[in-house]
Amino acid sequence: MILIFEMTWRARAHVPGNAATIDTIARAFPDQKIRVFAEAEHLDGLRALLEPRNFGEKIEFFPAADPAYLQGKTHIVSARRFAREFATLRQALAGAPAGEHLFLFLLSATSTAIFAVALLARRERRIKGVHIGLHGNLNEISGWRSRNPIVRAFDLRAALAAPLGNKLRFLVLEEAIRRELARILPRAGARADVLSLPVNLGEVASAPPPFAPPWRFGLIGQATRDKGIEVFLEIARRMKARFGERVEFYVIGMIRHDADQAPFAVLAHPPDHGGLSRADFTARLAAMHYILMPLAPRYYALSASGAVIDAITWRKPMIGFRLPILADLFARFGDLGILVENTDAMADAVAALIETPDQAGYAAWQAALGAARASRDPAALAAGYAALVAEKFPDFG
């Protein structure tokens, strides 16, 4: 039996990616029952995406404690959070059928969750393996650390370097992230595996918009510095001044309520302040010609990008900075758009796309994006993941 946990996020946060990962696991192990534990609203979102995949009774859903306390503050070492995570894991183990070999999968993990599952794995002989998903919070290993020795002993850097036993391994979403993790923390890198972030379930790339102006450029996700919002808005201002109504710029996501509104006046659509429904999100994304990826190298050296997966899913050519997570994809599948070195080069690339549109080149980019999309389908990833688990956790089966 496989027990899957989301103990870090609640409500709609990360639902599409989590559902696609669960789909991959279910396909990798067709003979294994799966139990999923998450906060109630998050669980409803997962169920809505997974039930159309016709897994029947193979996947069961169980509500877990609400992680509202400190959500989004994964860097804080909290005894209260450790107690909640430990209780969620222990209750799930207590409810599993006696005698079953168990494989645990943490869709995301704080440092305290890593210590909690390590403790239980030592105590429970039924646990034959644990994969611990690491996402954007992996950046905590290269940031500020508390001077308090007790806090430092239980932060993420300490957790990744700890002697956790041979039942536990980490899972990152891109090979480039594993390489960077191994550079910073060799012991953690040696314990890390890769499961590529799957494409979002139930979203089929629609026909592109007419290949004609106004040319629409989008930035996907929250309008943050790490996403490159300042670069995006600077390019938008330059291009609108130069090309006027021939070009439009959109933020396909949301901005903070306290953000200065003035810089966003250049956008073709007012920025959103609340949660954007997935239906509205995909409708806007479908209308784009191109996606800008001015991602911050500091953050995305250790974090995958859901925006990249959305662009691949919807076959939207990317104009992005030459980061490893993008360069690896271009090296494998060919040009998925244009990679550039800096803001001025990105502005030049955008201007060229507006001035000299190339429909044949656009079609070639979309074909390469289609190949990348096929490689990230859960069905395509499943066989590789099954082989990975068989190699790293031979006692599970």
Image (cartoon, rainbow, N blue to C red):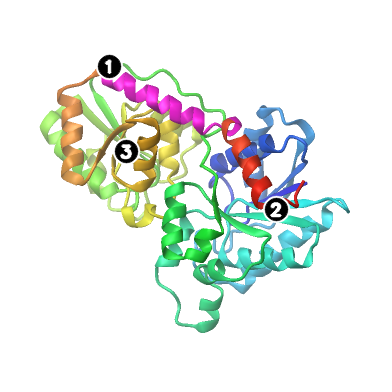
Q: Amino acid at mark 3?
A: Pro
Q: Is residue 314 magenta?
A: no
Residue 270 is tagged as: 3
Q: Amino acid at mark 2?
A: Leu
Identify the magenta region: 359-379
Predominant SS of the magenta segment:
helix
Quadrant of the rendered structure where residue 270 is? top left
Return the residue at label 2: 104
Give the x, y percent position of residue 155: 52, 71
Gap in angstroms between the C-alphas marked 1 and 2: 47 Å
Residue at 35% in and 36% down:
330
Q: Is residue 374 magenta?
A: yes
Residue 360 is tagged as: 1
Q: Is residue 63 left or right of residue 266?
A: right
* Residue that protrudes farthest toward the left in the picture: 242
Q: Badge 3, how many Cα within 10 Å: few under 14, some, many 20+?
A: few
- Does any portion of residue 225 appear in the rendered image? no
Image height of 119 relative to 137, above or below: below
Q: Is residue 133 left or right of residue 309?
A: right
Give the x, y percent position of residue 274: 44, 45
Q: Nearer the viewer, residue 150 or 7?
A: 150
Quadrant of the rendered structure where residue 34 is? top right
Of callouts 1 and 3, the N-terminal one: 3
Of callouts 3 and 2, the N-terminal one: 2
